């Protein structure tokens, strides 16, 4: 009962913030509304007893990605007074893409057989995640870190032009 | 906590048959409010007075000494004054974000208290991922500070906000990496688990466990100072350059929120250091009475935290502010590689001595004592030369 109330509160927070992100005329409001969306997702992870994932979500998305996004938005010129929108794609193509993507998602949600757990008891997940990462899934884990390394090197190459000359 | 809740249900305080979850939620809510009102807020207040007195001592001034004995009630006077001030919102400011920002900063300051291990029983929630929770929720400060900086619509605020964000995002990396050696040695992220892995005697603290954890403790302290916008890393509100940085346009209670969070952060820095490296609340088992033990542990924890807070006050009183390029150099060129080396070093150490190396603990503790002896000798020398009675006379 309590969990259901909390779930709906978190869902309203997440969906409401996401709506602000999408529909707000002010880019800065959109960016800050991402905070609500991320926090709502953190709450849902906690509700699902995924404590480690929730904390990493907080650390990576709020502490890292959100701050970088805010940085990028703040360094944009004229953020508050003009409606910045991507004009290269018109309203009709956007509508078509939205309807098609939404239809596919609705179809997927409809066709999936959702497994309902009887009840979720909070139990430590850290050991399991650690063992899985460094045991069965060590190869995908290392490949993912290789992708991050490539991104790091790419960022350095792009930002340092004088290194090439 | 569970027995307490069961007792409360059995006592019939909540009517006939309340559900366990509801009572637990109420109890935790009340406990959180008590911690907030009784510990967090007064600490932030008292520490402003203490810091001003300590600085004054360092700079050969008197400092606030009028309100109450030795000026002890100065923080209440300041707080009352700030409550009475008008809450100004600049006409050109972005009002909703401007109003929201102090609450976010306050939230980031309050949340870590929920995993604060005051003693073996006094902890709101001993989360399995406690340390991670502690560091991730403090990262919320950045969002509040950036919001304040942007919403004020003022170049000083914006520069302060952006500086603060750059600083916190950078120093989060060495701070996070310096926690790893301890996690590697204990195999847990829970605050109580880490404290229980240490002993009450200093040679069993993690700061003296091996050379790598000693370095990690220092790196964590420096990074925590930078994350808390403390001198020598107070660029976000550099008074001589940016008026008051991101808080320039704030007044009254909203301004107080920013500064309460900032001074309260000192306790968080001290608590993190104490928990991870200084043995937390560990106290020798002198009594079988749980209440007595908990009180002793509470005192131990707070004394250790205050010692760390005191050191950061000396640093603030003595060091000049660093430049922004020096700040970034220190973080990315020195602290990050050092903390990576620390992590690998500790991993190797743990692989060689899985149960720790007792001899190293004693050796490092002896080294620490030697440094402390030299320091105390120096302090005694200065205290003899100074005229303490002048400082403690309230009538000056």
Image: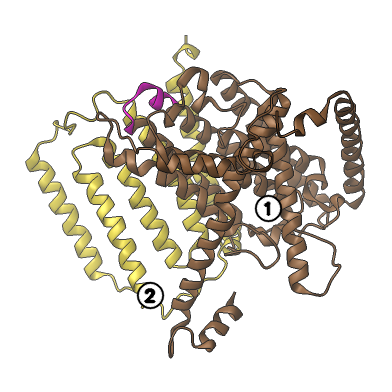
Chain colours: A yellow, B brown
The part of the image, by quadrant, that contains residue B310 is top right
Q: Which mark is residue A2?
A: 2
Vertical placement of residue B97 versus B329, above or below = below
Position of residue A55 measured from the top left corner of the image (x, y, whole percent):
50, 54
Pointer 1: what residue? B183
Taking the image as shown, residue A20 lies to the left or right of residue B287, namely left
In this orientation, does residue B342 appear? no
Q: In whole angstroms, how far apart are the C-alphas of marks 1 and 2?
A: 34 Å
* Parent chain of label 1: B
Q: Residue at x 59, y 27 (%)?
A: B233
In this orientation, does residue B126 appear? yes
Taking the image as shown, residue B102 lies to the left or right of residue B296, namely left
Q: Residue at x 56, y 39 (%)?
A: B172
Is label 1 in contact with label 2 (beta carbons under 8 Å)?
A: no
Q: Secondary structure beneath disc 1?
A: helix
Front-lying residue, A81 or B183: A81
Vertical placement of residue A91 versus B377, above or below = below
For disc 1, the neighbor class at 10 Å (few under 14, some 14 to 19, many from 20) is some
* Parent chain of label 2: A
Main secondary structure of the magenta stretch: helix
Front-lying residue, B208 or B111: B111
For disc 2, the neighbor class at 10 Å (few under 14, some 14 to 19, many from 20) is few
Q: Is residue B160 magenta?
A: yes
């Amino acid at each position: 009962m309590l969990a259901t109330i909390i779930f709906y509160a978190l869902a309203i927070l997440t969906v409401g913030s996401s709506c602000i992100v999408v529909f707000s005329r002010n880019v800065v409001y959109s960016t800050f509304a991402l905070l609500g969306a991320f926090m709502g997702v953190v709450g849902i992870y906690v509700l699902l007893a995924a404590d480690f994932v929730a904390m990493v979500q907080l650390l990576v998305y709020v502490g890292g990605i959100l701050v970088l996004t805010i940085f990028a938005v703040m360094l944009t010129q004229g953020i508050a007074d003009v409606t910045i929108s991507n004009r290269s794609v018109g309203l009709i193509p956007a509508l078509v893409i939205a309807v098609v993507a939404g239809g596919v998602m609705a179809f997927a949600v409809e066709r999936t057989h959702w497994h309902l757990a009887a009840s979720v008891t909070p139990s430590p997940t850290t050991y399991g995640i650690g063992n899985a990462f460094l045991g069965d899934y060590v190869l995908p884990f290392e490949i993912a870190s290789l992708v991050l390394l490539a991104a790091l090197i790419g960022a350095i190459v792009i930002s340092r032009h004088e290194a090439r000359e | 906590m569970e027995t307490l809740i069961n007792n409360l249900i059995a006592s019939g305080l909540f009517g006939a048959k309340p559900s366990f979850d509801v009572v637990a939620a109420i109890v935790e809510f009340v406990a959180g409010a008590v911690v907030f009102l009784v510990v967090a807020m007064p600490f932030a207040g008292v520490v402003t007075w203490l810091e001003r007195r300590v600085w004054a001592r360092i700079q050969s001034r008197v400092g606030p000494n009028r309100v109450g004995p030795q000026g002890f009630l100065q923080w209440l006077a300041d707080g009352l004054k700030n409550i009475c001030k008008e809450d100004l919102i600049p006409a050109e400011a972005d009002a909703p974000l401007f109003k929201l920002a102090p609450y976010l900063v306050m939230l980031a300051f309050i949340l870590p208290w929920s995993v604060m291990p005051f003693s073996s029983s006094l902890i709101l929630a001993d989360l399995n991922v406690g340390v991670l929770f502690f560091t991730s929720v403090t990262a919320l400060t950045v969002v509040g500070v950036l919001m304040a900086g942007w919403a004020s619509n003022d170049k000083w605020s914006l520069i302060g906000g952006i500086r603060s964000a750059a600083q916190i995002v950078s120093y989060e990396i060495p701070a996070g990496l310096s926690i790893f050696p301890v996690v590697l040695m204990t195999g847990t992220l829970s605050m109580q688990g880490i404290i229980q892995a240490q002993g009450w005697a200093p040679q069993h603290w993690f700061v003296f466990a091996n050379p790598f954890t000693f370095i990690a403790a220092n790196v964590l302290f420096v990074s925590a100072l930078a994350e808390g916008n403390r001198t020598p890393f107070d660029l976000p509100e550099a008074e001589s350059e940016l008026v008051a940085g991101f808080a320039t346009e704030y007044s009254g209670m909203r301004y107080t929120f920013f500064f309460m969070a900032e001074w309260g952060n000192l306790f968080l820095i001290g608590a993190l250091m104490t928990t991870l490296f200084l043995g937390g609340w560990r106290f020798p088992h002198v009594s079988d009475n749980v209440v007595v033990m908990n009180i002793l542990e509470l005192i131990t924890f707070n004394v250790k935290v205050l010692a760390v807070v005191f050191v950061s006050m000396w640093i603030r009183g003595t060091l000049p502010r660093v430049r922004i390029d020096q700040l970034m150099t220190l973080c990315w060129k020195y602290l990050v590689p050092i903390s990576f080396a620390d992590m690998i070093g500790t991993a190797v150490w743990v692989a060689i001595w899985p149960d720790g190396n007792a001899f190293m603990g004693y050796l490092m503790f002896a080294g620490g004592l030697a440094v402390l002896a030299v320091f105390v000798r120096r302090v005694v020398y200065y205290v003899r030369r100074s005229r303490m009675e002048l400082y403690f006379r309230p009538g000056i």
